[in-house]
Every structure is written in C-alpha cells, then in structure tokens.
Image: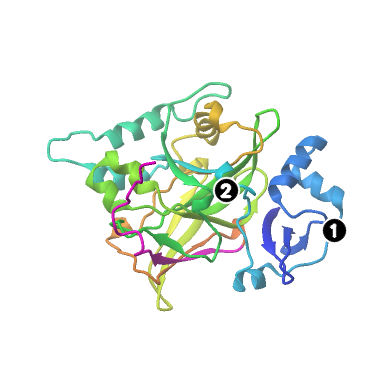
Amino acid sequence: MLLSQLTLTDGTRAVAARTDGQAHLVPGATSIRQLALDAWEAGRDLAAEIAARGPGTPVDLAAALREGRMLLPLDHPDPAHLHLTGTGLTHLGSAATRDAMHQGAEDTLTDSMKMFRMGLEGGKPPAGEVGAQPEWFYKGNGHAAVAPGAALTSPAFALDAGEEPELAGLYVIAPDGRPLRVGFALANEFSDHVTERGNYLWLAHSKLRPASYGPEMRVGPLPDHVEGHSRIIRDGTTIWEKPFLSGEANMSHSLANLEHHHFKYAIFRQPGDVHVHFFGTATLSFADGITAQPGDRFRLDCAEFGLPLENPLAHDDTDATPVAVATL
C-alpha cells in the first residue's frame, strides 16, 4: 500500500491510499500522522485502519503532482516537532567516495573507512542485540522539509548543491513514547559535498540543508533489495543518470540497528513528534564530477515507491551578508 497527502482542488487537505494502481481518498483523514495515531489507539495497523474507514472517492495523484498539490507524505502541524536526521556510510558502496573525499597524503586508513568497517563487522547484530553505532547527523526540522515538486534552495554561502538519492524511514512517536514506523519514502537528502570535502568535521555544516521526500509512502516492510534511478535534468535534457541501491541486502547495517541508535536518545521519543530518518546512499553525481546549477531538476524514480520525486535546484542570494546579533 502507498499513502500520500495532497491538497484537493478546493484547497482542503486529504490523505490518499493506493493499491493495485488505483488511488482513493481515505474518509475522514486529512493527516497521515493523525491516521497513524488513530490506528495505534485502536490497536491495529494502518492497513486495517484504512480498511475500517471504507473506500473513498477516487483521486488522480499524477494530476495532483503536475499541479503542485502533492504534500510531504508525513508532516507535523508544528514544523519544530518534525526532525530531519540521517545516517551515513551505511551502504556497501558508500565508503569509496567518502574515503576519496577525506583521504590525506599521510593517511593509511581514514576515519570514514574505519567507521565503514565498524558497520561491516558489527552493523547487523542478532535480533535483540545492539550493534555498532553508525555515523549520525542532523539536517534540521520541518522548516527544512520541502514538498515534492518544490525547490531545494541552496544558501548563498554553500560551496556545492548536490543530490543524495536514498530512502527515508518515516516515524511518529506514540503517546507512550514508543517510535512507530509509518512507512518508507524516496528521499533526496541534498548536501554540500565540497564543504564536507574541505574537512570531514564540517559534515555537520554540509548537512544543514533542505531535503525532500515522497510523494508517496510505502507502508509495510522494506524489500531486501531496492533499485531506483537518479538523474539530473538541465533544460529538458538528462545530463547525468545512475541507478541507486538500497534495502538491507545492499547495506552494512540493519534497519533495526540504525533505528535503535537514533531512538535510543530520549529526546527523540517525545509523544506526537515526527521523525524523517535518511538511511544513506552510495550514489552521488558529485563523485562523477557533476556540478548542479540553479534550474536543474533532481529526479528519483523507483516503481515500488510510486510517483517519482522531482525537485528543482534554486540558489538563495539573500543571506550572503554576515548575520548581526542584536544585544538586548
């Protein structure tokens, strides 16, 4: 099942469920977050909650996407209670690019490669056990979450504006503090790889950028092997394209291990909060020498996740001057 949020032609919010290619509105639902909490309170999963509400009106999601009416598949009415975070060096091909970025003449084994090896050796522990900690980073809150079709805006101080095609886990925290995985979505994690390459301790700076995910959310288990397609389109022509892989068969960590090391912190288990956690990638146009330009379009396709995720690149020149802090 695929779930999504959209604005109808009359301006109202709605939730759509898609099975076997046909999408219907979910009666009485305007928020997947609330739908998930309702399901939890009723003691059933999302599919059962939707089935209990009966079939709704058919809806054309492709038209909604073309018309800019698709919303993020999971959000929060207060953007400060939506957390964008992620883990890196989690995929079997991810170490080579990062290692090349961080390699110094005197190094025999970079910190990136050490971290990657920790994942290979201990990232998939037996059920019920805790494995190796992954790299972890913070991207921002709901103010940095960009709807499908909307622009990913690079700040004036950025040195690069590069896509990161991957999957994200989407979560709501239950009233008792338990994390509830609502589903998975295509995601463009969007980072500044030139800044990161300058010094790996600038990784935190390189990640504080907007991100997009959706348009649809896959409900249920993640397939072991996921293969999508990433491309950059300039003036209607594809200038770069490559497949990207995800799913545990292509990862050095299990999803359960990545989730544990995020939600082990009590601050991330606050009732009602929403979490969007990016699981990492091994595919970057930056690694192939591509520099994206304003107006380029990043497009991610994967049939198992429904409609493609596409966002144009924009550049913000309004914040180029130093920030002045006032004294009260």
Residue 238, position in %: x, y?
40, 73
Q: What residue type is disc 2 on?
A: Pro
Tell which of 58 and 78 is nearer to you: 78
Part of the protein shown in magenta = 307-328
Kindly identify the residue that appears in the image at 37 percent across and 69 percent down: 294
Within 10 Å of disc 1 (Cα), the crowding (few <14, some 14-19, many 20+) is some
| Residue at image mark 2 | 79
| Residue 35 shown left or right of residue 80 in the figure | right
In this view, which residue lies farthest toward the front? Answer: 328
Which quarter shows the C terminus? Answer: top left
269 displayed left or right of 244: right
Q: Is 321 included in the stretch rendered in magenta?
A: yes
In this picture the colour scheme is: rainbow
Mark sitting on residue 55: 1
Label 2 neighbour load within 10 Å: few <14, some 14-19, many 20+: some
Q: CA distance from mark 2 to mark 1?
A: 30 Å
Q: Taking 287 as reference, is 151 left or right?
A: right
Determine the residue positioned at 53% across, 47% down.
168
Q: Is residue 220 above or below residue 230?
A: above
Task: Report whether residue 100 is seen.
Answer: no
**Whole-percent x, y for residue 255 in the image:** 54, 36
Judged by its main secondary structure, the magenta piece is: loop
- Vertical side of 124 occupied by 226: above or below: below
Mark closer to the observer (2, 1): 2
Q: Mark 1: which secondary structure?
A: loop
* Numbered circle sitting on residue 93: none
Quadrant position of residue 164: bottom left
